[in-house]
Image (cartoon, helix red, strand yellow):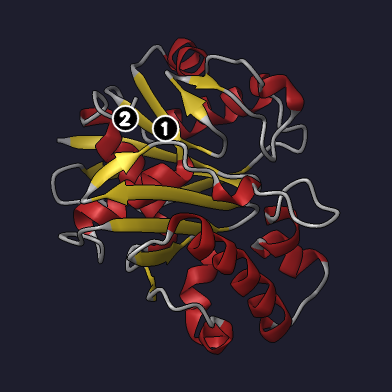
Amino acid sequence: MNVLGIDIGGSGMKGALIDSFTGEMLTERFRIPTPESKKPKDMAQVFKEIVDHFDYKGPIGCGFPTVIKHGICKSPGNLHKKWLGVNVKELFSNITGLPVTVINDADAAGYATMNYGIGKGKGGLVIMITIGTGLGSGAFLDGELIPNFELGQIPYKKYKKIETWAAASAKEREELSYKKWGKRFNVFLEFVELLVSPDLIILGGGTSKDFDQFREYIKIDTPVIPAELRNHAGIVGAAAAALHQAPID
């Protein structure tokens, strides 16, 4: 079945039609910048524009960059504070007139990687880290999703959350070299290793494509590998979630 997957990030909202059984992208990715306000009404309008672009009628899967529980935003994350408590599933369903499944964006990326990518068949505790505006994380135990595993929210020194200091947005904002940023990212991974002792860490998001430029600064014992699907994983996983929403929605 062909399903529209939409991946919402702090800087961009993008979608594509996906073969939900193979994970193959059937169209080019269509992207619209996330509205500067990052408020629910404005972002819902962009969501509808993406749906209209594909002239799509059917179930939609959406990866959303905050904690989502039963379709409701439980933390505004890097978005506007007005998102707190919003039923995202209901908001997007109402504006499009279509059924929408909403899951955390890192969970979506992990879902794609574990079902269609390099994580397929991997047992034990696998952590998917998406590197972007924030640091998203998805956790899988023997292939089963543990939802809303938000490791990027760990407080660090003067920062309320470590992603403010160690995400790709910090690298861009402070114009850090891959060496300086890679050492910061390694500090984050040290916390991940200490707290949950994963068997494998898979890196996704746009920055993962540059893994070779910061690989040498990753010093933890846990194996760390880049995801094959990279920046498309959120779209692919969101689409698949629309057909497999029972265990994760």
At label 1, which amino acid type do we have?
Answer: Ile
Does residue 62 appear to the left or right of 171 in the view shown? Answer: left
Mark 2 or mark 1, which is nearer the start of the sequence? 1
Residue in the image at 73% along x and 81% along y: 180
Above or below residue 210? Residue 161 is above
Local packing at callout 1 (Cα closer than 10 Å; few below 14, some 14-19, many 20+) is many
Above or below residue 138? Residue 208 is below
- Choose mark 1 or mark 2, whichever is in front: 2
Residue 248: image tag = 2
Q: Nearer the viewer, residue 88 or 188?
A: 188
Q: Are marks 1 and 2 in contact (CB under 8 Å)?
A: yes
Q: Secondary structure at mark 2?
A: loop
Q: Quadrant of residue 97?
A: top left
Q: Quadrant of residue 61?
A: top left
Does residue 143 appear to the left or right of 42 in the view shown? Answer: left
Q: Which residue is mark 1?
A: 103
